[in-house]
Amino acid sequence: MFYGSMVSLFHCFIRRYKVIVKQPGTIEQSNNKYNMPFIKTAFPGLLVYEPRVFHDDRGYFFESYNENTFKESGVHISFVQDNQARSVYGVLRGLHYQLAPHAQTKLIRALEGEIMDVVVDIRKGSPAYGKVFTILLSAENKKQLLVPKGFAHGYAVLSETAEVMYKCDAFYHKPGEGGIIYNDPDLHIDWGVPLDKAIVSEKDLQLPPLAKAIHNFIFGEL
């Protein structure tokens, strides 16, 4: 009797909370109650994270990252490296990626100022292949963008200065560097700043358009 009751209780728990068991490095977009902080996009696996912010007369507090919250929402990522960059208005960085097997999932946010964050889906076989997603990330709105492997990423600074931090689930690997030119005529990216005022590194100016870029991402295999 006791064993049967425990089994019934376990199955009830599974049905109620829709428990999801996934391998590390995967993103499962569940519909359970814990998925509240994440907003789906039209791009498979690309999520906007909006943390709960608690305000009082002293200021505010929020969890910018909580491993349990992510896991309970179906996001099973182990981050290994944090990167931070400060830039002035008009600085445009990107579009960058690392080739598989050194591809990176990134969680991006603005600590100060605001940026236009841009990603391009370059996973062969993806229904969104070659399409562009943009979002305003700022210290004020506190939104973050979770970018899965297989996307090219970049951003432009819209404020006087901006400080950007992003978490990665794989270490930097120089031989695996790849990229796409920011003004690819086939992508029609609106960076939020006049391109004649954009400050772009010499290295990024040498990047090819998507049609000539080397990438090895297969949708569903990353």
Image (cartoon, helix red, strand yellow):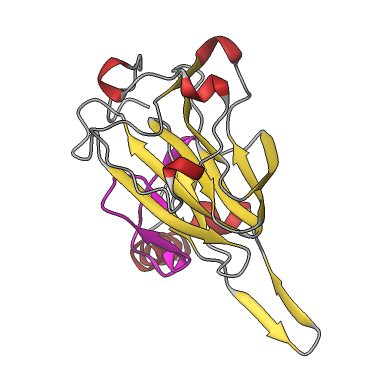
Residue 81: within the magenta?
A: no
Q: Quadrant of residue 22?
A: top left
Q: Residue furthest right?
A: 58
Is residue 214 shown above or below 106? above
Q: Which residues are magenta?
A: 22-47
Q: Position of residue 131 (x, y in %)?
A: 25, 40
Q: Which is the main secondary structure of the residues drawn in magenta?
A: loop
Q: Would residue 2 be found to the left or right of residue 59 on screen?
A: left
Q: Residue at x 27, y 37 (%)?
A: 187
Screen quadrant of the C terminus: top left
Q: Quadrant of residue 221?
A: top left
Given residues 148 and 11, the one toward you in this image is 148
- Res 204 seen here: yes
Q: Residue at x 34, y 17 (%)?
A: 213
Q: Residue at x 29, y 47 (%)?
A: 43
Q: Residue furthest bottom?
A: 57
Q: Position of residue 58 (x, y in %)?
A: 81, 84
Given residues 205 and 3, the one toward you in this image is 205
Residue 42: within the magenta?
A: yes
Q: Residue furthest front?
A: 196
Q: Position of residue 165 (x, y in %)?
A: 65, 46
Screen quadrant of the N terminus: bottom left
Q: Give the total number of marks visible in the rendering.
A: 0
Q: Quadrant of residue 110?
A: bottom right
Q: Residue at x 51, y 46 (%)?
A: 156
- Res 22 seen here: no
Given residues 36 and 11, the one toward you in this image is 36
